[in-house]
Each structure stands twice: as structure tokens, then as C-alpha cells.
Amino acid sequence: MSGVGKGVASSSIGKILQDQGYKVTAIKIDPYINVDAGTMNPVEHGEVFVTEDGLESDQDLGNYERFLDVDMYRFNYMTTGAVYDTVIHKERNLEYGGKCVEVVPDIPKEVISRIEFAAQKTGADFTIIEIGGTVGEYQNMLFLEAARMMKLKNPSRVIFVMVSYLPIPDKVGEMKTKPTQYAARTLNTAGIQPDIIIARSRRPLDAPRKKKIAVFCNIKEGDVISAPDIETIYEVPINFEKQGLAQKIIEKFNSLANGSKKGKLGKPVENKKKISRWKALVNKIRRLSGQSNKKTINIGIVGKYFSTGKFVLADSYISVIEAIKHASWKNGYYPNIEWIDSEQYEKNANKLKELKRYDGIIVPGGFGSRGVEGKIKAIGFARKENIPYLGLCYGMQLAVIEAARNLARLKGANSTEIDPNTKYPVIHISEDQKANVENQRYGGSMRLGAYPCELKKGSISRKAYGDKTILERHRHRYEFNNEFREKLEKAGLSVAGINRERDLVEIVELKNHPFFVGVQFHPEFKSRPLNPHPLFNQFIGSAIKIGKKN
């Protein structure tokens, strides 16, 4: 089911195989007709993750990057829409030689072609392919068919892992295996037999349940892997390795390869240094999260993509959350992250005083006018009260609006996204983006992917990065309006980062403030657990100092 942990399981399998010395890449398959994830609602689908080469993809590509410490690209992600789009394009170009193009086998063949391309492009020993959604869903049938065809074509080169949830009903108190039995049988109807089952549950799997799954799902007991809830997702690879999962996978491939022309897997040297660093990180997280630990830092995230009904959805900002954690752990603190609905400040400005309890405030990316005035008020409060502030994408643009209104005295200053008729459009749409909007070209048309940025000498950002030029990932349509640059700088807003190619403002900072930085890009996408992003690291460091002072 959605959210059970397929992405983390895929990332963790890749991680433990990587630690054995193999080169690993990963692919996410989404069953949506959307060509990419850019037009999907974050509340329904979670965060839109942007790759280095500018693809708007599923948030699991962020998991792959964080666990494997390698960049993902366009070829690491596909959707039903993208696959159909390619097949139709090929048909129009007579690439099928005039044959009738059919859903089966031509769609599964295109899926396989994309998988093989990604494996060849990266030179990977292992390609982890995650099929999103749930076994038995109508929209997944073609991807399962592609998987079956791959296994048929190369039986020694493909194995299947099923991630299944084992509920423990509160009133019953017993872990139930029936849903997993049913899932395995449903997978069998697609012509696929799982080789390994990862059993997700609140608690570890016991021997009777493991035996029952083995008997009814037609696998060995040793191939049922217990995956209980744990403190941090970064512990999952260690849990898998304790159960010998990497070795089981290698042995299965070697067993399948007996007598095959492909031969057995080589034996690269496992990366003990890398393994020990990962284990040290997990031990540090456990220690910092312990009840006796008093080193906690309070971070407030002011936004709007937080809830569906009565449930809070952290997935909307998963990369931001992980980047905060990475930097906090590096600084020896455990983060207490709280969600703040900006709309409450529009109704009651007195509630802004509550922001004093936070050591640092972040306004992340977003779109639209809902809750914007509340965010601007929160930014103004952080500015005046010397609370460390980090604005990401939209958070940078709103910081510019706040400074324009209250420092430069440009009453009513705004973004043309919010108010097309504003007298002072300090944030506006560029000409190329204007044409996209006028012609309703929304999908994949923003400024996307990595762009260079030159940092101002002596700036907070330059100090954080330690480099003159950086490369960061973007996802936006609206830009800082250079007509107001001089006036805003005179008022106290410092332009600390510029894209020289197009003379675009990428970073703004506030003088005489502990930490007030707004960036037009998304630094959270490039943060890794063993290598926190420098801006988040600097932000958390400043927040710790403020917390101690208070």
C-alpha cells in the first residue's frame, strides 16, 4: 500500500549492495498518466523532487540519492504517461515499420527498453526497479507484465522482492499474515513469484508468522525479511544487513546463473569505511533521540501543504525535513520540527508571538496565493526578532516582498503571481515563462534543474559554501525583478548570489541579522545524511547559537 516503505526498502537494498562493492542505480515507475510528477498535487502525491537535469519526479528519487549518494537523472524515472507518449511518438514516426502497435507487448517492451537504457547509461551491476502503487491495481498491470517478460527473457538476471504490510489490529493483538498471503497470490496471477518478501509491521516478525508466510507464499523462511518500525529510516539498511539480505540476493543471482552464459557475479571488495560511517551516523541518531538527551533544536516550517482532513502530511516537504535532520545531527542536536499553518496569522496577527519559541524558521517552496500574507508576516517577525530564517524558492520571493514593503517602503509591493496589477512587482514572470503561461504550457516548462550561481564575497552564503560558484537545482517560473534591485539593496537587502548568464538574482540576505537567507533554488534536494547541505548546516548552526542565547 502507499507509504508502506517501498521507496526506503528499494533505497536500502541498493545501499547494502553498494556497500558490498557493487555499482547500483535505481528506477521508480509511477502508474500515473501524468508525463512527470510536476503537475501532481503535493498533498495527494507528496513532494515533487527535481533531478540535476531538470526532471520533475517522484519523491523516492530523493530517497535513492540520499541513501546511495549518487545523482538521479531523467532515465531513473518513468510514468505510464511518459511511456505511452514515447510509444505514440515512435508510431507517428513509423518506427514500428507499419505494424499494428498494441498495448501488449509494445508498452511493456518500451518499459523494458527504458530499464535497460538506465542500466547501460550508469554502468550499474544492479538496477533496483521500484513499481509504485499496489499489486492488483489495474494501472500496474502493464509494469508487472514488463517485469514478467524481463524474467522470461533473462531468468538469471531478474529477481522479485515484494514489500507487504502485516497489520496488528489493536483489539486482536496478533500480527496477521492473510493480507500478505493474498498479495503474493495476486502477484502470482500476473505470472510473478516473489523471491523475497519484506514484511513491514509495527513490530518484528516472529517465527510462527515467518513460517506461515513461507508456507503459503511459496518461499524459504530465510527469504522472509522482518522490517519493523524503527526510529530512523537510515537504520533500515543495517536491519536488512543483520538478516543477511545482501548476501541472500547475491546467492540467488549466482544460483540462477549456474549454467547460464551470463556467468556468476564477481566479488568486489566491500567498502568497510563507508559501512562504518553509516553505522556511526545511525548510532549518533539513536543517541541524540534518546530521552536523556537535552540537545534539541526547535525548527518551525511555515507553509500550507500540511494536511488532508485530520492528517498531517510530512511527505509534501520530505527533502526539507531530511535536510534539517542531516544538518542537526552533524551539529550534535536532534531537531524538533513543527508545522505552522500560515493562514492563522492572516486571521490573528497576535499569534505571531508564538514564533519566539523556535530557534529557526523556514518558509519552503510553494505556489499560489493561499496563506501568502501569513507567510510574509512570519518572515517579517523573524527579521525583526532576529530569529534565523531560511527561505526556499517561494520563501525567498516572499522575503523580497516583505523587505520591499517594510524596508524600502514600497507599499503594496508583491509578486505578479499573487497580484498581476501590483504597483511594485518586485517578483515578476520572465518573458519566456510568460509565453508558456499564455499558451497554457504548464508541464515541464518552469526553470528546472541545475544552474550556476556566483556568490558575493563576504556573504553568509559564500561563507557557508566555501566556494565562489555553486550549482543548485531550480523549480520556479517567477524571478526577482532587477528594476528594484538597487532600491532594495539601499534599504538593507543584500543580493548575495547571481546567475551571470541571465543576470538573475538567486540569493538574498539581510545585513545585521544572525542568519537571514533566501534562495531561489532548492538546496534541500542535494543534502545527504553523511554530507549535509552547507546552507542548512549554517542555518542550523545559527539556530543553535540563538537557542543557547535564549
Image (cartoon, rainbow, N blue to C red):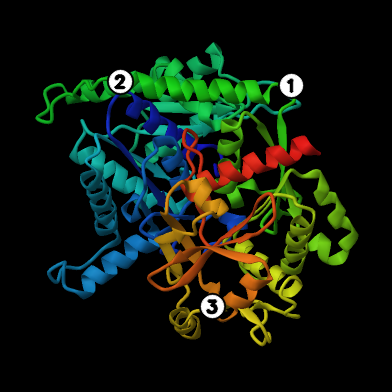
Element on which disc 1 rests = loop
- Counting from the top left corner in percent of width and height, residue 20 is at 31, 23
**Horizontal arrangement in the rendering, residue 72 relative to residue 376 (left or right):** left
According to the picture, the residue beneath numbered tag 2 turns out to be 270
- Counting from the top left corner in percent of width and height, residue 445 is at 43, 72
Q: Amino acid at mark 2?
A: Glu
- Counting from the top left corner in percent of width and height, residue 40 is at 53, 62
Which residue is at a point 71% across and 28% down the rendered structure image?
295
Q: Residue furthest top?
A: 207
Label 2 neighbour load within 10 Å: few <14, some 14-19, many 20+: some
Earlier in the chain: of badge 1 and badge 2, it is 2
Element on which disc 3 rests = helix
Q: Amino acid at mark 1?
A: Gln
Image marks 3 and 1: residues in contact by CB distance under 8 Å: no
Q: Nearer the viewer, mark 2 or mark 3?
A: 3
Element on which disc 2 rests = loop
According to the picture, the residue beneath numbered tag 3 turns out to be 482
According to the picture, the residue beneath numbered tag 1 turns out to be 291
**Horizontal arrangement in the rendering, residue 375 relative to residue 21 (left or right):** right
Which residue is at a point 64% across and 84% down the rendered structure image?
420
Label 3, label 1: how far apart the Cα atoms are: 50 Å
Q: Nearer the viewer, mark 3 or mark 1?
A: 3
* Tally of numbered tags: 3
Q: Nearer the viewer, residue 2 or 178?
A: 2
Which residue is at a point 35% across and 22% down the rendered structure image?
246
Q: Amino acid at mark 3?
A: Asn
Image marks 2 and 3: residues in contact by CB distance under 8 Å: no
Label 1, label 2: how far apart the Cα atoms are: 35 Å
- Counting from the top left corner in percent of width and height, residue 353 is at 86, 53
Q: Nearer the viewer, residue 377 or 56?
A: 377
